[in-house]
Image (spheres, rainbow, N blue to C red):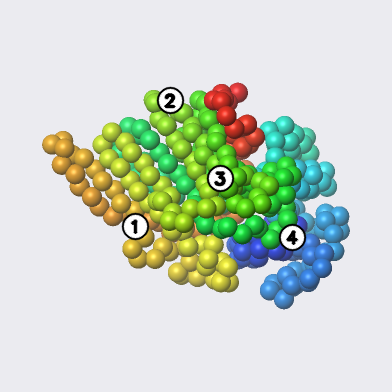
Amino acid sequence: MTNAIKTGLLAYGMSGKVFHAPFVATHPGFDFRAVVERHHKQAAQDYPGVISYDSVEALLADPEIELVIVNTPSNTHFELTQQVLQAGKHVLVEKPMTASLAEAQTLFDLGRHMGKQVFVYQNRRWDSDFQAVQQVINSGQLGQLIEVHFRYDRYKTALNPKPFKETPVPASGIVYDLGPHLLDQVISLFGKPLRSHKTTGRYRTNTKVDDYFTIHLQYPNELNVFVTSGLLVANPLPAFVLHGTTGSFQKGRVDVQEPQLQQAMSPTAAEYGLEAPGSEGVLTVVGAEDEKTTTKVPSLKGDYTHLFEAVYQTLRNDVPYPIQEEHILWQIALLEQNAGDWAFLG
């Protein structure tokens, strides 16, 4: 495509191979130009013609690169995103954007000062299961929402082999790992909460970082939202549970994009993003005579391509990016909040 966005990746590990390169390479609005590979040079084998730089500095010195994706360990996001902006590039930074609200605000302000866009990568807005939740809420069939639960359950007793995941450095632990996914989904639906209460815990042997959390968010109209994640959940509960005055909805975490991408399926494949049969959500609606009707709700196709399309539309056509600055600032404030007493978002 003419005027494609020449793009560079700062790493070619799991996230680069799975969540970024396939989309930058297949979306016609992007030109996958370069990647940083300090040791093993693999990107060019997967994507012939891609330049492999030995350092971040070398990639940032490439005058053709317009957009840089910061997909490095979480505790490096602030420094590297700052470096990218100072080099005069637009930036797409993975979650969590930063460890603190002050750092996040600094980066957004720097982006404005440099005349560059700061995008945050929140791909789970385009999960098939979450889209089903959106559909049901928008249909109005649940009436006034009363209680909402979003969960991300795993069972992993072993400590993560990646040191940055298990070392108590800024932006470490499950709150900063899985919390951004859950909080972004909630914020995209309901906006800014009135107040919140966080509980965290450490249960795996020898762990030095939190491996459990739950955050209770209170919204106007007496809506209570709970986001929860744990690494020792042997029998996961439904990922999405919603109760309203006229109905309930349950849905498992069944989006297939990550395993498909790990198996090297192209995002352009016909079967990409399609849930397996039997993965439908369950909607129970109560009628005027208190009769209950239960139906299965199929999901739309999941597709992270929409995030990259949104980046393209912002850079080329000035269309507002759906993951707004204020969404990220609210999210980081909730991540940074200490466990314990109720806190009000400023």
The Cα atoms of the two marked residues, 3 and 4, are separated by: 28 Å
Give the farthest residue toward the left: 289
Q: Is residue 63 left or right of residue 32?
A: right
For badge 1, the amino acid type reads: Glu
Tag 4 and tag 2, C-beta contact below 8 Å: no
Residue at (82% x, 46% y) in the render? 83
Tag 3 and tag 4, C-beta contact below 8 Å: no
For badge 3, the amino acid type reads: Tyr
Residue 146 location, x and y as percent? 35, 32
Q: Height in image: 105 above or below 232?
A: above
The mark found on residue 160 in the picture is: none
The Cα atoms of the two marked residues, 1 and 4, are separated by: 36 Å
The quadrant of the image that shows the C terminus is top right
- Which badge, 1 or 3, is on the more N-terminal residue? 3
- Which badge, 2 or 3, is on the more N-terminal residue? 3
Dot 1 falls on a residue whose secondary structure is loop
Q: Is residue 339 left or right of residue 147?
A: right
Circle 3 residue: 212
Residues 130 and 173: in front is 173
Residues 317 and 290: in front is 290
For badge 4, the amino acid type reads: Ala
The quadrant of the image that shows the N terminus is bottom right
Circle 4 residue: 11
Circle 1 residue: 280
Residue 85 location, x and y as percent? 78, 44
Dot 3 falls on a residue whose secondary structure is strand
Residue 131 location, x and y as percent? 43, 50
Circle 2 residue: 220
